[in-house]
Image (cartoon, rainbow, N blue to C red):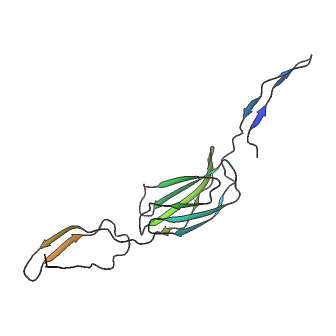
Amino acid sequence: MNDTDVLYVCLSNSIGDGPLSFAHYFHIQLPAPIDLTITSVNLSVLSSTEILMKWNLTRIAPSIGYHIRWIAANETNKEKNYITSYNDTSVVLNDLNPFTVYKIMINVFNINGDGPIYETDLIRTDEDAPGSIDQLTFSYVTFTSLQLDWQLPKSLNGILRSYDLTYDNRL
């Protein structure tokens, strides 16, 4: 497909034609890709921080790209995005939060605008080890007992199943 055109101008009157002008090269801009749609998207969780996204398009066309956006389902203003070229059909979304549900969207675009948005089903990243507890405090300390209090970790990274306490008096 040749996307460069050339134009010559020749003036005419009753006597005849004048000389051709110099060549003028130009590009015809494509309209926004409203006829190019994502037909399917396949999401696979790779780890606690990565999701593989693969997609199919009605047809491949040069001069377009893909705009991929994702946001954690429990957040409203922290949307992230990634732009990839027309010959890509997959991408790994990384640096995601563990055990988090994401809403992912993709659309084709060109210089003149965006095509229709394809919204995927919600998907959750895998669990990861929990973060450390905060503000560990001891109170009511006696020879036979003590009370421990702490704040939950900022990042549970999954379903908390137990607290394991270890006591060692050999110091």
Image quadrant of residue 2? top right
Quadrant of the frame with the C terminus: bottom left
* Residue 92, image x, y percentages: 53, 61
* Residue 85, image x, y percentages: 61, 52
Please, which residue is most extreme toward the left here? 143
Residue sitting nearer the eye, 36 or 97: 97
Please, which residue is most extreme toward the top here? 15
* Residue 163, image x, y percentages: 27, 78
Residue sitting nearer the eye, 33 or 98: 98
Please, which residue is most extreme toward the front here? 170
Image quadrant of residue 90? bottom right
Residue at 38 percent across and 72 percent down: it is 158
Is 140 above or below relative to 2?
A: below
* Residue 55, image x, y percentages: 62, 63
Q: How many marks overall?
A: 0
Please, which residue is most extreme toward the right here? 15
Is 114 above or below relative to 96?
A: above
